[in-house]
Image: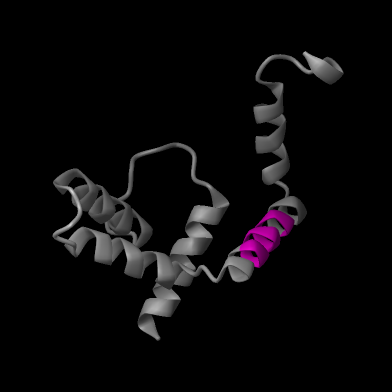
Amino acid sequence: MAAGYAEGGATVRASELLRKPDVSALVLELDRNKAAELGVSALWIAERLKGESESEESSPASRVRALEVLAKLTGHFVERSEHVEVHEVTYRLELDRELEA
């Protein structure tokens, strides 16, 4: 493997780095900047998912998938997992704030 890393080592190292507050804050800031540049917000995503779930033009599988993703995004459906991404929690909190406004 290049640079002397073991197979799968990059994933482990990335996970370690994301646990550092300064690194995770920088990644979150870069994510927010990219979202702002694209004009994408949690509310925008939720509106599109809701539209997809209600569209008669969408296949039944697409409609169910849109509802599943929307439920996860709004915190109504949580997959059981030992690992929670910092960004997922942050986006969920941002969506809750936008939906309350």
Q: Quadrant of residue 48?
A: bottom left
User: Does 93 appear above or below 71?
Assistant: below
| Prevailing secondary structure class for the magenta stretch in the rendered image | helix
- The residue stretch that appears in magenta: 26-34
Query: Quick one: which residue is furthest to the right in this view?
Result: 3
Judged left or right of residue 98, residue 37 is right
- On the rendered image, what quadrant is the C terminus found in? bottom left
Q: Residue at x 18, y 57 (%)?
A: 57
Q: In x, y percent, where is residue 24? A: 69, 53
On the image, which quarter does residue 50 sit in? bottom left
Outermost residue to the bottom: 101
Query: Residue at coordinates 37% horizontally, 58% vertically from top-left?
Result: 73
Q: Residue 70 versus residue 24: which sits nearer the camera?
A: 70
On screen, residue 46 versus residue 64, left or right, reads: right
Check the picture and name the quadrant holding the N terminus. Answer: top right
- x and y percentages locating residue 66 in the rendered image: 27, 53
Q: Is residue 26 above or below residue 41?
A: above
x%, y% of residue 14?
69, 36
Q: Is residue 21 magenta?
A: no
Which residue is depicted at the point 78% across and 18% down?
5
